[in-house]
């Protein structure tokens, strides 16, 4: 499914990286596999690694185009078979990449279903990393359809929030890029609420930037009854 975005960001290195591109990649050992499903993003985060690195040093995550669902499934199949042959059980699949995966909402469902069909481990986590708010602009005006992700087999949402209030959110994330989307911060949290209601396990993600403290993040997450993770800038 293609989506017309008024503002789209592909990162500042786009067009300058020519090495082989990776649809699947690892960052934390063989038990965690990440799927790089898009480079399109309606945000322009001040901390976006795409502007400085082609992909965590080991992979090239700059895609010349979004891979098809079939290409993603094939890349997953090939890589998961290699892992299995080593006697390692995958514990987590992260659907993320160098962009905003929720823009491919319709495609995430067959991908999640495919992974569930291939992997018999009921405890396997399938996580979508998202900023949430684009769901309400490009997929549906209400939260009802979030449950389709759960039904397809997604178990976790990592909701990248990064700020405790709208002012800092707009400054850090720049939702809408040049024309700041005024409801993005509240809709990011609305997405989290909707995902929680749909039975998904939601973690609010923050980057340790500026004056943000563990205590502030903890009490913010408690207010929403969600887990949280405050990670270091380059982690
Ligand atoms: S949401 Fe992710 S990909 Fe998009 S600009 Fe922010 S850090 Fe970069």
Image (cartoon, helix red, strand yellow):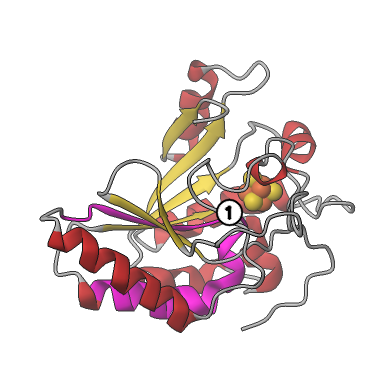
Vertical relation: 188 (above or below) 66 = above
Viewer-proximal residue among 77 and 95: 77
Q: Residue at x 67, y 41 (%)?
A: 48
63 part of magenta stretch = no
Looking at the image, which residue sits at the far front?
19
User: Which structural element holds mark 1?
Assistant: helix
Question: Which segment is the magenta one?
Answer: 89-116
> Magenta includes 104?
yes
- Give the quarter of the figure containing the N terminus: bottom right
Which percent across, then down, holds residue 180? 84, 50
Q: Which of 77 and 47 is in front in this view?
A: 77
User: In front: 182, or 62?
Assistant: 62
**Residue 132 visible in the snapshot:** yes
Q: Where is residue 56 in the image (x, y as percent from the top left)?
A: 53, 42
- Single out the residue that lies furthest toward the left: 87
Total tally of numbered discs in the picture: 1
Q: Residue at x 31, y 78 (%)?
A: 114
Horizontal and vertical percent for residue 31?
25, 49
């Amino acid at each position: 499914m293609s989506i017309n975005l008024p503002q789209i960001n592909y990162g500042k290195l786009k067009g300058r990286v020519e090495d082989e591109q990776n649809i699947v990649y690892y960052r934390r050992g063989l038990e965690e596999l990440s799927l790089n499903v898009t480079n399109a993003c309606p945000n322009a985060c001040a901390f976006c690694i795409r502007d400085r690195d082609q992909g965590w040093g080991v992979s090239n995550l700059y895609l010349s185009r979004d891979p098809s669902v079939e290409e993603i499934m094939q890349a997953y199949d090939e890589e998961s078979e290699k892992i299995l042959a080593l006697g390692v059980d995958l514990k987590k699949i992260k659907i993320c990449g160098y962009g905003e995966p929720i823009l491919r909402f319709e495609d995430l469902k067959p991908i999640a279903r495919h992974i569930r069909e291939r992997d018999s481990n009921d405890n396997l986590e399938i996580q979508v990393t998202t900023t949430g708010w684009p769901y309400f602009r490009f997929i549906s005006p209400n939260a009802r359809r979030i449950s389709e992700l759960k039904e397809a087999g997604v178990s976790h949402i990592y909701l990248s929030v990064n700020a405790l209030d709208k002012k800092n959110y707009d400054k850090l994330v720049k939702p809408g890029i040049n024309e700041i989307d005024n409801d993005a911060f509240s809709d990011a949290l609305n997405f989290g609420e909707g995902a929680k209601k749909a039975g998904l396990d939601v973690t609010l993600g923050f980057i340790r930037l500026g004056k943000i403290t563990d205590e502030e993040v903890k009490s913010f997450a408690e207010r929403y009854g969600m887990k949280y993770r405050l990670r270091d800038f380059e982690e």
